[in-house]
């Protein structure tokens, strides 16, 4: 399905729920090592990532201190102003590298979240740092949708990530090794064209710092073919009978039903939901062959219920679905690349 308003923002329709199988395998994010240089300008701790004396990591990560100049230490604890070298410090017993000079390194692994202050036992208050340890977090829950609901060989299938948990990277396997390098993608919302009619297992792996999970869905691709465009009170036949249109609605109470279709011109019409005097949805399919070789879909609505508009190319069997979410004012459709074919 597509989420409005335009092609670049649409969401794919629920695909093949009966065949879909969720395969989740949570994995912990690999531990990382963060480097802090000591004494590069005489009296400072400089984290290589932040460029400051603050090192931000996740639980399970390691900080490695490298001595690059003079003699210093990394001693866990806090300091107060005053006293020797401008301050007095209290060691809390968590770690202490001891005093060392250039060429030495010391590492400490942080297993729990929190803020961990440390200082140089020589320079005390005037040379301090902090390690900010964040919780590792949970892996995302991978999921996705695809459209059209009835894909045919040779026509693109759009996949849209619907994972929860804010993944930061995506890895797709379309289960189509015959497509070569095109069988994989790292885009969040890729498109893939299956050249042969078959059932393919498409897998998305979604990843965050907390780990990865995978979701697989079986996608059945048909050989395609023409169907009849038959007009009735729930369907419009537009553009010389090439495109068959229908719509459904769903209210907040969960009730739903088909919209009633009314033809206007050879390439336009409207739908009403609850009252024939109340127009809810106006649609138009335009064969723009001379402009970009595609057929365009336009729609405007006067409603905030959930609306699903389906447009079927009866010559190829390819369909597109556009969904306006529940409790959202209907956003216009301006899809100038809906179908890569012309009558």
Image: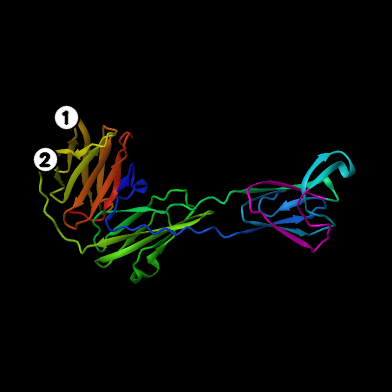
* Callout 1 secondary element: loop
Q: Quadrant of residue 64?
A: bottom right
* Relative image position of residue 332 (x, y in whole percent): 30, 38
Q: Which numbered circle lies on residue 329?
A: none
Above or below, 205 relative to 115: below
Residue 93 belongs to the span the image colors magenta: yes
* Relative image position of residue 184 (x, y in whole percent): 40, 64
Above or below, 273 relative to 146: above
Residue 7 placement, left or right of 95: left
Asked if the residues shown at circle 1 and circle 2 are in contact, with their CB atoms under 8 angstroms apart, the answer is no
- Bin the neighbour count of mark 2 within 10 Å (Cα to Cα): few under 14, some 14-19, many 20 and up: few
* Callout 2 secondary element: loop
- Image quadrant occupied by the C terminus: bottom left
Specify the farthest residue to the front: 93
Residue 251 placement, left or right of 74: left
Is tag 1's residue or tag 2's residue first in the polypeptide sequence?
A: 2
Specify the farthest residue to the top: 277
Residue 191 placement, left or right of 231: right
* Relative image position of residue 316 (x, y in whole percent): 19, 58
Q: Quadrant of residue 201?
A: bottom left
The residue indicated by pointer 1 is 275
Residue at 22% of width from left, 46% of height from top?
310
Residue segment shown in magenta? 92-120
Colour setup of the view:
rainbow
- Bin the neighbour count of mark 1 within 10 Å (Cα to Cα): few under 14, some 14-19, many 20 and up: few
Residue at 85% of width from left, 48% of height from top?
123
Give how far apart the Cα atoms at labels 1 and 2 are. Answer: 14 Å
264 or 235, which lies in front?
235
259 or 136, which lies in front?
136
The residue indicated by pointer 2 is 233
* Relative image position of residue 62 (x, y in whole percent): 66, 57
325 or 22, which lies in front?
22
């Amino acid at each position: 399905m597509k989420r409005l308003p335009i092609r670049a923002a649409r969401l794919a329709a629920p695909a093949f729920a009966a065949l879909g199988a969720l395969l989740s395998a949570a994995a912990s994010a690999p531990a990382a090592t963060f480097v802090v240089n000591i004494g590069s300008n005489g009296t400072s701790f400089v984290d290589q990532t932040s460029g400051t004396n603050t090192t931000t990591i996740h639980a399970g990560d390691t900080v490695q201190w490298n001595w690059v100049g003079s003699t210093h230490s990394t001693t866990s604890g806090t300091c107060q102003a005053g006293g020797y070298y401008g301050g007095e410090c209290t060691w809390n017993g968590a770690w202490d590298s001891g005093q060392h000079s250039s060429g030495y390194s010391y590492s400490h692994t942080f297993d729990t979240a929190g803020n961990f202050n440390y200082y140089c036992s020589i320079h005390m208050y005037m040379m301090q740092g902090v390690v900010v340890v964040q919780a590792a977090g949970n892996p995302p829950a991978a999921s996705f949708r695809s459209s059209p609901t009835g894909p045919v060989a040779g026509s693109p299938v759009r996949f849209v990530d619907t994972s929860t948990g804010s993944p930061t990277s995506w890895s797709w396997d379309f289960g189509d090794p015959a497509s070569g390098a095109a069988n994989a993608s790292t885009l969040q919302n890729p498109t893939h064209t299956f050249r042969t009619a078959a059932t393919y297992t498409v897998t998305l792996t979604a990843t965050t710092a907390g780990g990865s999970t995978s979701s697989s869905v079986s996608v059945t691709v048909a050989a395609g073919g023409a169907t009849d465009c038959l007009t009735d009170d729930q369907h419009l036949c537009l553009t010389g009978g090439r495109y068959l249109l229908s719509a459904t609605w769903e209210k907040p109470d969960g009730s739903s039903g088909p919209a009633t279709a009314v033809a206007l011109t050879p390439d336009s019409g409207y739908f009403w939901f609850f009252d024939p005097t109340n127009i809810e949805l106006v649609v138009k399919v335009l064969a723009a062959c001379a402009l970009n070789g595609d057929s365009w879909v336009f729609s405007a609505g006067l409603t905030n219920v959930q609306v699903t508009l389906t447009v079927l190319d009866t010559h190829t069997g390819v369909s597109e679905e556009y969904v306006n979410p529940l409790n959202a004012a209907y956003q216009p459709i301006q899809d100038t690349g809906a179908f890569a074919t012309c009558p």
